[in-house]
Image (cartoon, rainbow, N blue to C red):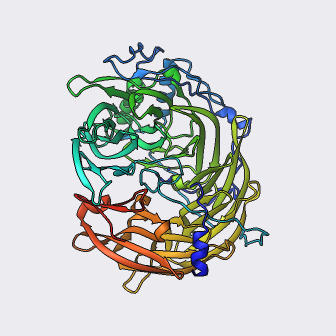
Amino acid sequence: MTDLERLWDDYPAGPAPVGAILAASAPPTRQRRVLVRPLLTAGAATALTGAFVAGTLVGGSGPAGPAAAPGGPGGPDRLPRHVAFQADLEPARSCADLRASYVERGLALVGPWGWGLELFEQADTAAAGKDLSATPAARAPRTERRISSETGTNVQEAGVDEPDTVKTDGSTMVVVRGARLDVYDVTGASSVKVSSVDLPGVDDPEILLAGDTVVALGRDTGSPPDAPGTRVLTVSLADPATPDLVADVGYDAAQASARQHGDTVRLVLARGLPDLDFVEPTGKRSRKEALAHNRQAVRDSTLEDWLPTVTSGPSDDRTSRQLLDCDDVALPTDELALGTTSVVGFDAASADRLDAIGLAGLTDIAYESADHLYLAGSGGGRVCADWCDDAGGTSYLFDFALDGTRATHVASGEVEGALRDRWSLDEAGGVLRVAVGPTSETGNFSSVLTLQQQGRDLVERGRLDGLGHDEEIQSVRWFDDLAIVVTFRRRDPLYTVDLTDPAAPRLLGALKIPGFSAYLHPLGRARLIGVGEGPGPGGWGAQVGLFDVRDTRRVTRLDVLPYGSRTTALAGADPRAFTWLPDQRTLLTVIEKSSSRRVGYLSILRLAGGRLHERRIKVEYGADVDRIRTVPLPDGRVVLVTGEAAQFLEL
């Protein structure tokens, strides 16, 4: 056995650690503030008004409407109400106050052509800040191994499952193909398809699996293209040979996030600006007249225009009700983008019994740890209708404690800077860690911040500035006491940040190489895989790099495999297209090559002697390339799922 093999066999398994927020920069004449200001202090927190008061909010007994009879045909059941406000927010005092808040903020966003500001602040992004160099440490923090979830999906957080097109419990596997769910028995020498069931009314569904219950989620086919709704179907696999569709619930709001904790499913739904009776200037209508008409349309809008509804029941007898009662909606600061964000929790087997709370503002990113949900949104006059535009450089954070289907708001904060996606957030030991890129309110560099709840506020505890001047964050990976941040413009600086002391994050080292890693996957304490793009013999294209991270102060790249021009590694945008098999020291990733048509390859990479040894299989074409999955089973076998087949993979 080699030293490398001994080291590999000794790897410990460790726990695994939401649209990017874009921002315009400030005018060159403005005095630039280099440092991100601390998150909300107790005094500043009073600027956030509103509330989260929970319960199941469909047909509630508050001002919005009468209560629905539990289990009746009128809609989802109502769960017992609990107080979801324990922080700096207060409930809307009445439906009139809630409507007035929407209207007042809407009037500031409407113009002669409808939703949208006429002028947006423009700016340059001159570099600011100071360079930070690596500092020696007595004990450098380390990476840990990451493995797929129990249902076979490569996820961000251990114990927090994510929707996918394939799920398994080790003996039964379910696969979504179009509007159909196929059920397979994978206990024998080959996979056997045992049944299928239609998934009506849902576009491009993805699924979650809890016991013998499948929850399918996707865009509601009955919703308009410019205002997508969400459909949730529940399928019982009590008898896998005869799957049974047992529940059908729809929301007229777009799905921003879906996560599963045990048997609990939690949705974050976003409903943007309503479609009102707007006009535009014409030869017979001046801009002033159009503006007056559009402002009156906002004044005439009702709560039904602003708040989402939920629909349930059989296809021939569906009933709709308002999802949120007025006193179940928080009124955030004026700076948060206008719209409605809903947090909905339910048991997988009871999708029509809801716990839901709402926020009268839009958030872009949702990150869930084992026991907290963090929502992040931007502000500064942000407009979201069919599109979004950001005119500010501040991100707003909302922290919710999770208890079963319930979410309780416990703290709020804000940070100057832009979050790329959900991977920019992580929680460990009660500390929220955030990676932010530059905006008009920061220097032209990226930063890593640590935040902690103090009373009702998320306050800054530590920070590290100066990462990647004139560059953008491409990927982030978090560990208990370490962060790895990749930025890119022409080269790929891979930064390692020591988080052992959350109050004093320290830069350990930086590795600069051509290309960049859009997805990082740790293999243990010695190796890290980076999937991204870079130069190769045939030109720019997909690449996979193998890094030595035993000394996180001096990370080195051991090997790189370029795939050639016109290739893309799908895991860079969708980590579910990546699988790590620690027992076989093998990784599987999907590579697309585009020429006259899309061709999908499965790249099988075995690690030995500090090198990548590849075998490549052509497996799919066209749109089905996005559906290629490799699903590990508990017995060590792997199922390769393509557009129409599911077969065991010979490694």
**Going 35% across and 79% down the picture, which residue do you hit?**
565
Q: Position of residue 223 (x, y in %)?
A: 28, 37
Vertical order, 177 against 286 (above or below): below
Q: Nearer the viewer, residue 492 or 551?
A: 551
Q: Nearer the viewer, residue 71 or 442?
A: 71
Q: Is residue 170 visible?
A: yes
Q: State left or right for residue 44 relative to residue 295.
A: right
**Going 58% across and 23% down the picture, which residue do you hit?**
91
Question: Picture quarter containing residue 293?
Answer: top left
Looking at this rendering, what residue extends furthest in the left direction? Answer: 316
Q: State left or right for residue 626 relative to residue 89.
A: left
Image quarter (top left, top right, bottom left or bottom right) of the C terminus? bottom left
Looking at this rendering, what residue extends furthest in the bottom direction? Answer: 537
Vertical order, 362 against 528 (above or below): above
Q: Nearer the viewer, residue 288 or 268?
A: 268
Q: Is residue 359 visible?
A: no
Image quarter (top left, top right, bottom left or bottom right) of the N terminus? bottom right
Q: Position of residue 550 (x, y in %)?
A: 65, 73
Q: How many marks?
A: 0
Q: State left or right for residue 281 relative to residue 179.
A: right
Q: Position of residue 479 (x, y in %)?
A: 63, 59
Q: Position of residue 415 (x, y in %)?
A: 64, 49
**Going 44% across and 43% down the picture, which residue do you hit?**
258
Looking at this rendering, what residue extends furthest in the front direction? Answer: 188
Vertical order, 463 against 64 (above or below): below
